[in-house]
Structures are given as C-alpha cells and as structure tokens.
Image (cartoon, rainbow, N blue to C red):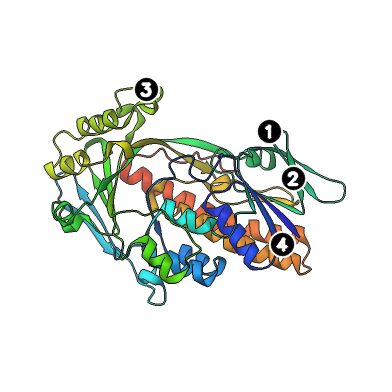
Amino acid sequence: MHVIVAGGGLGGLALAQGLRRAGLSVAVYEKDPDAAFRNQGYRIRINSDGITALKELLTPQAFEVFAATAATPGARMSTFDHRLNLVHAQELPLSPDLPGGGHLAVNRTTLRQILLSGLDESVHYGARFSRYDINPSGTVTAHFTDGTSATGDVLIGADGVSSAMRAQYLPQAQVVDAGLRLLYGKVPFADHEDRRAIPPELLGLWTTVVGPEKRFVGLAPVRYREPMHRATARIAPEIELSDDSDYLACVFGARREQFPCTDEDLFAMEGPRLRALTLSLLEGWHPVLADVVSAQDPASIFPVSVRTSVPTGTGPPTAVTLLGDAVHVMSPAIGVGANTALRDARLLSDHLVQAADGRPLAEALHAYEKKMTGYGFDAVRDSAGRGHALVGQDPLPSHEE
C-alpha cells in the first residue's frame, strides 16, 4: 500500500510517522517551499490524547525527544476578570503514566521538527494540492497546482482549514468565520527577573483574563527543562532542533467589530502597531496585563481569524479521507485542535495498517470516519459553546446536516 498525504502540518506528519513505523510506503506533499517558510506559531498544549497518539506514532527515540523538550506547566487552568480578580480555577486530572501527567506545553516549531525527523525523502515541498481523480483500477491520483501529480492507493487530505481536498470530497461541508480576531505574540523570559515580574497565578497551564465586551488575554508559559541541543545529543543526535528560550505565550482576542480597523488593515500591520493596538484595547485593565503586552517581542506578533467547521456527515467511502483541520477545524476555546488532529493520525494509521493487512480499504476508511467525525465534531461543538459563553464567539450555525 502506498499512501499519499496532502499537507505537511502536525496531523499529516504524525500520520506519516505512524505509517512509516508500521512499514507502509508514504509520501507527503506540502504547499510551502520549505519547512521554515512561515511562522508555525508558538506554544500549544498537548493533552493525554495527543501524548498517547505521539507515543504510538513516533519512534521511541523521537518520542523521548518530544517528552524531554516539552514544558511541564502543571494542570491548573484559571480565569480572571480584567482587574485580576479570580473568577474560576480548576486542577485538571493527572495521568501518572504520561509525561507531565498528561499536560505538556510544546513549542509548535519544535514539535514539527521532531515530526519531520526521518522523513526527508518522503516530504515534497512546493506541492499545493488542487484536485484528485479516482482511477478505474481503484487507485487515486493527486494533482498539484504546478502541474505535477502523484498516484497511490489512498489519498489523505491534511491540508488545513482552507482544504482543497475537503472542497472536492465533502462539498457540503462549511467553514465559517467565528467572529473573533486573535493577536498572537510571545514575551521572552531572558532571565528570572522577567519571570518574577509576572504573578505566579498567571503562569499555570492556561490563564484567561476576560474584560469588558468579552475582550480577553490568554497566557501560557513555556519553560524548558534543558537546552534543545543537550536533549537531542543525549537521546537522538540525528534529530536536529532549533534552539529556543523560555517564553510566555500571550494572545489578545476580541470580536472583529471591536477592532478600529478593517481586516485588511489589521492583517497588513506589523508587530509594533499590533502591540500598540492591543494596548489601546486594554485601557483600564490591571497594569500587570499592560506590562505583559508591552514586553512582547514585536517581531513575534501576528493576527489570526478564528474559523470553525460546521458539523456534517461524510459521503460514501472511497480511496480518500480527511484529518485534522481539513475536516473539523475549531476555535481554540478548549485548546484541543492539535490534539484532535494527532488523535486522527493515530486512528487513521491503525485503520490503514488493517487495510494493508487485508481489511477492505473502503470498510477501514468508513470505520475511521465514523469514529473521527464523532469525537471531532463533539470537540467543534464544545469549543464553539465555550467560546460563545466566555469570549463572544459566534454560535455555530443551527442547520447541521
């Protein structure tokens, strides 16, 4: 069996790792010209689902590197008002058999570099997927915008929120604007003094500060236990990681109509103007929050439009399927988007191995889709519900198909 994966994000690469480990042939086609072409984002939370998936998909050495380069911020999640009065706090349950008790903070670029390790000959850059054909033999051919194509037994759409695969495979599927705009940035922790300037109660697994008109700031630290190069030298010298320093991920968000500019202007702004804009929208908030935003590295700040899928059914099984944001993109309100994609990769890898061992491919993919859309769209609904209640995200359209 030869598997083609359209999209080299976290989910697509995790799937490729699992298939390669199982002895299946796999090729990943990624639209970016190289692995470092664009900002991959900063801190992401990896929960027990994501950790378990990575343990199954990665080689033991790569998983050990993942665990060693992940921060362990504990399990406390807190919500404050804009004057830093505590509104709600909880300690999430721990999984003693998993690194960090099942709660890790991971640098997205670091995780992606780990997922790329060993796949040099399998990942093809500069290949933007455009369409596919199901051939009379039952194989599938993927076509790319540069005129090239690739044929395999299975085609997996892991091409993200704007998935061209989804548009062809599930034309009835909708992705809608959730009404929120986010400004992501990072506050460097150059030394302990930088860290001590921030109250420790704001440095848990995730902290949300909600103010007037449901504007909000999200805070989450990434504090490494050892330098990247030392971890790889000790565990797997063949894995190359970019060095990184401790930092605080800082996200400001608000409804789109609260920004005093158009989306076009917002997305054209550079870091210093985005930081100044954030500070103007935090007037009257606790001065600690203004200090945190002021300490952001302006070069790190970038805007994001929050989008969400609308749950839908799938069509008759063929030799293609989807995973991750290509099928169930969700708002970050409950912080499980990446974990859900990793869970997809683990489940799909298992089902493709079954197909390679003789289970009918259509049956294996149908079983995968039934389970994946179940937990995936549950997460979409939960994310939309919390996002609506806490920070004013648009409710999901009511006309689910």
Q: Which residue is mark 3?
A: 265
Contact, CB < 8 Å: mark 4 with mark 3? no
Q: Nearer the viewer, mark 2 or mark 3?
A: 2
Contact, CB < 8 Å: mark 1 with mark 3? no
- Counting residues from the N terminus, which is met first, the one under dot 2 or under dot 3? 2
Residue most extreme to the right = 136
Q: Quadrant of the N terminus?
A: bottom right
Q: Which residue is mark 4?
A: 364
Q: Is residue 347 left or right of residue 191?
A: right
- Counting residues from the N terminus, which is met first, the one under dot 4 or under dot 3? 3
Instruction: Say which element carries label 2.
Output: strand
Instruction: Say which element carries label 4.
Output: helix
Instruction: Say which element carries label 3.
Output: helix
Q: Which residue is mark 2?
A: 150
Q: Which residue is mark 1?
A: 146
Camera-side residue of 263 and 28: 28
Relative height, residue 238 to residue 12 (above, below): below
**Which residue is at a point 57% across and 45% down the rendered structure image?**
326
